[in-house]
């Protein structure tokens, strides 16, 4: 009995140690990757549900380390923990806006949507840095959407509201990502006056229709509060049909396109133009 317990404890601490070890190693590699420009971006189309035209693209970061694809769900939290998220975030912003200028030559109305960590919004200088990046690139602010999760409302609301207000004054659009999965406060959303709500894929893909009633509630809210609704994770024609019938304005998911490299997106936009 005693032996088994000791065995279990040492097994547990062993795996915990290797997890911490992996995190520490990845944090060092992240710093190297930043210096050596080892990240890349892929872009997933967001589609107008009525016309099926492309409305925007979401930039998603990719990182290959020694041939292995490390998913952002793994390394973004590490970047946050080790104080690297701000630098990575500005790299994403600058690169995505720069590449979007090229895409806009093919599709002038295209907006680019970028994921922003809650930690970035706690930086009081964030909005003024965004402003100077947009000015340097001559990028139109209203074609930049910043996706933040509901967790921004959970703490440090004051800095967040200040930063978001400053961004909106620039003309940047604010999008609430993964809506419905986290802490959501309607009154905080009213304070901010969000421009776009992205309904999480767990509702979109819900088989027993409960998810769709949540989508429906969001659509009702959207018409009085005046924001766009994007359904994420649309994979089937049936989902596409139901969501459109409910009044969802925009759709995103594998059904329309997987995230594309910049050259594949250029091809996609050219094909759309031709058709
Ligand atoms: P997210 O912002 O919710 O992004 C949506 C994720 O769902 C992406 O995974 C996308 O590839 C995937 N997806 C898109 N369509 C479908 C679909 O039809 N079905 C399914 N099952 N999945 C779909 P990805 O690229 O692995 O990104 C994961 C998360 O990592 C993102 O979730 C976001 O929170 C974070 N992330 C990605 N890029 C960045 C970035 O540049 N900065 C920050 N701070 N976070 C990022
Ligand atoms: Ca997102
Ligand atoms: Ca999302
Ligand atoms: Ca997410």
Image (spheres, rainbow, N blue to C red):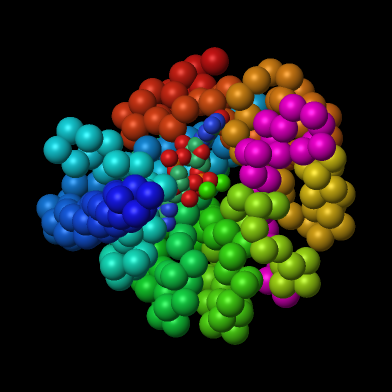
Q: Position of residue 31 (x, y in %)?
A: 18, 60
Residue 72 lies, in percent from the top left, at: 37, 47
Residue 266 shown left or right of residue 237 in the figure: left
Do we see residue 131 in this rendering? Answer: no
Q: In which quarter of the image is residue 240?
A: top right
272 or 78: which is nearer to us? 78
Tell whether position 117 is magenta.
no
Q: In which quarter of the image is the C terminus?
A: top right
Residue 85 vs 156, above or below: the answer is above
Side of 182 where 126 appears, left or right? left
Residue 194 on the magenta segment: yes
Residues in magenta, as a range? 191-212
Give residue 24's position: percent from left, percent from top.
22, 60
- The answer to whether residue 117 shows anywhere in this view is yes
x, y percent for residue 29: 17, 54
Residue displayed at 68% across by 31% down? 205
Residue at image x 51%, y 22%?
Answer: 272
Residue positioned 54% across, 56% down in the render: 147
């Amino acid at each position: 009995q005693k032996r088994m317990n000791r065995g279990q404890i040492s097994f547990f601490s062993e795996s915990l140690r290797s997890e911490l070890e992996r995190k520490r190693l990845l944090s060092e590699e992240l710093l190297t990757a930043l210096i050596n420009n080892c990240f890349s971006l892929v872009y997933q189309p967001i589609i107008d549900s009525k016309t099926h035209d492309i409305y925007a693209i979401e930039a998603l970061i990719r990182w290959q380390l020694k041939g292995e694809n490390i998913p952002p769900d793994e390394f973004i939290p590490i970047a946050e923990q080790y104080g690297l998220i701000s630098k990575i975030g500005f790299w994403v912003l600058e690169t995505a806006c720069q590449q979007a200028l090229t895409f806009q030559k093919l599709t002038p109305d295209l907006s680019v949507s970028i994921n922003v960590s809650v930690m970035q919004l706690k930086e009081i200088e964030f909005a003024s840095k965004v402003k100077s990046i947009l000015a340097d690139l001559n990028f139109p602010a209203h074609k930049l959407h910043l996706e933040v999760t509901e967790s921004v409302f959970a703490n440090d609301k004051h800095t967040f509201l200040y930063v978001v207000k400053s961004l909106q004054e620039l003309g940047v659009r604010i999008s609430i990502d993964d809506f419905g999965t986290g802490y959501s406060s309607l009154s905080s959303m009213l304070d901010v006056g969000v421009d776009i709500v992205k309904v999480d894929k767990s509702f979109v893909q819900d088989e027993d229709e409960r998810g769709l009633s949540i989508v429906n509630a969001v659509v009702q809210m959207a018409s009085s509060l005046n924001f766009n609704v994007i359904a994420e994770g649309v994979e089937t024609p049936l989902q596409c049909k139901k969501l459109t019938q409910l009044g969802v304005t925009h759709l995103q998911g594998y059904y329309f396109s997987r995230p594309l490299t910049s050259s594949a997106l250029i091809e996609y936009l050219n094909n759309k133009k031709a058709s």
